[in-house]
Amino acid sequence: MKLKTWLLSSYLIVMILPLLFAYLLFAWINDYNEDQKVKEFFTTTIEMKKIQRVLNDPSLFQRDASRGEIEQLVDEKLSIQLLNPNGLVLYSSNPVQTVAVPVNRETLYGNLFILQQEFRSHRYKAPVFDQNKLIGFYQIEVARDGWVQAVSQRSTWATIAFVALFIVLYVVVLLFVNRKVNRRLTSLQHDMTAFAKGNQVMEENIIIQDEIGQLQTHFYAMQKDITDARNRIEKEQQEREYMIAAISHDLKTPLTSIRAYAESLELNEQLTKAQESEYRQVIIEKSNFMKQMLDDLLTFTLLQSPAYEMERTKVDGSEFFEMLVSDYEPLCQKKCIQLHTTANVKGEYEVNPKQLMRVVDNLMTNAIQHTEIEGKIWLAALTECEIEWLYDFVQVTYSFDWVNNVYIIVQNEGQGIAEDHIQSIFKPLYQADEARRKYSTHGTGLGLSISKQLVEKHNGNIQFFSKESIGTCVICCLPKL
């Protein structure tokens, strides 16, 4: 049940139940009073008959009549009053009513022969005749002390019962509210406070799926997201620190070489023309490597920024991708590598030409570097084709969607990479052969990471496949326009 529904139901019960109980008490007391009234009516009527036999004596209404028998009847609970036909009081057992003030005619003749049940007394009034002549009236009043006391006791007990019910109802509602709302909110507040202080809060099993349960679910989800974000930021910070340290070290090595060769040229220590040319060539190579490293670092840092938006231009697929896979033949021939290129892309695409060329350059540089002499490299940009040269372990794993995507494939023969290294291959500065110090003229270790981010900026994805002693295949998938 939703908390809102539960609270409204509780409020309704708290409002209705006391009213219902009060009504039941009132009905019970009223029924009881009615029963007592009936019993008391018959009892009083019988008593009145005895008294009426005495008061029907006409001699009692004479001015100097002896009323001793009446005096024997009256007591604290019973009072008798005699009136003449004009409403003047002839006798009253109540001294207060002996004042000779005539009763008006309407009151005098009203309610005759009727036993009137008032709250504190029963009252009966009747005329007295002597030979069909009205000689007066008598009025009998019997106090209802027992009735009043019983009513008072019943009212007291009813009040006590009502108050007890209210207290019990209040305590029950308080316990339920404390169990269903306060305790859970307090627990959630403690969890939030602990998490705000940096402590990890254990996730509880949420049984009640109401608003508070949903709030707890959202809190645990938020805690997980924040914890994951913290861990990710901490990991990125560690990687950034490692990258800065590694690149600083890699920059230091070519700088040392450049300085050493430059000092040798400056001092002109009887160098031959060939040596001077060699030294200048080394300085140029080291400078180019440093420039490439700084360029990669700048690109990597730029791609890490969430605010970076890469501009894309609409290009003709056939022309652009044909150009993209060309111009690598001289590099492969230099290392005696067989290069097979294919391009059959059709249609228009939105790409950043410079950055997409950088992706292919990075992939081809890695392929050439890890392909042995007389080895083979395949470079293809495809939108439809049956690829016979694709490795079997790639074909059984990867599924092509020729309708919606264009694929850039770089495959090379070589030693390949162990399966446990493939998951980390796109990490910055990661080297599967753990030989970073040996690639000083080959790359910075950021190429694959940059390539992955550039492909994702094109709303595509890149996947890396490799098998030891066979080779490596990288597939870039880009969506069509």
Image (cartoon, rainbow, N blue to C red):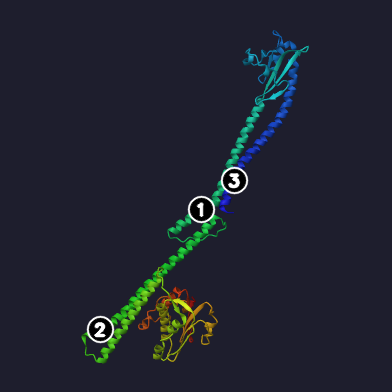
**Disc 3 target residue:** 12
Question: Which residue is found at the position 72% from the left and 20% from the top?
Answer: 112
Q: Is residue 156 visible?
A: yes
Q: Splitting the image into 4 quarters, where does residue 166 fall?
A: top right
Q: For the residue labelled by badge 3, is the local secondary structure a helix, a strand or a loop? A: helix
Q: Which mark is residue 343?
A: none
For disc 2, the neighbor class at 10 Å (few under 14, some 14 to 19, many from 20) is some
Q: Is residue 79 visible?
A: no
Residue 251 percent across, percent down from the top left: 32, 78
Check disc 1 and give the amino acid type: Leu
Q: Is residue 188 left or right of residue 77?
A: left
Residue 273 percent across, percent down from the top left: 25, 91
In the current view of this chain or complex, which residue is farthest to the top? 64
Mark 2 vs mark 1: which is more N-terminal? 1
215 up-or-down from 135: above or below = below
Q: Is residue 472 left or right of residue 145?
A: left
Q: Is residue 309 left or right of residue 184?
A: left
Q: Which mark is residue 262?
A: 2
Q: For the residue labelled by badge 1, is the local secondary structure a helix, a strand or a loop? A: helix
In space, the residues marked 3 and 1 are separated at their CA atoms by 23 Å
Q: Which mark is residue 185?
A: 1
In space, the residues marked 2 and 3 are separated at their CA atoms by 93 Å
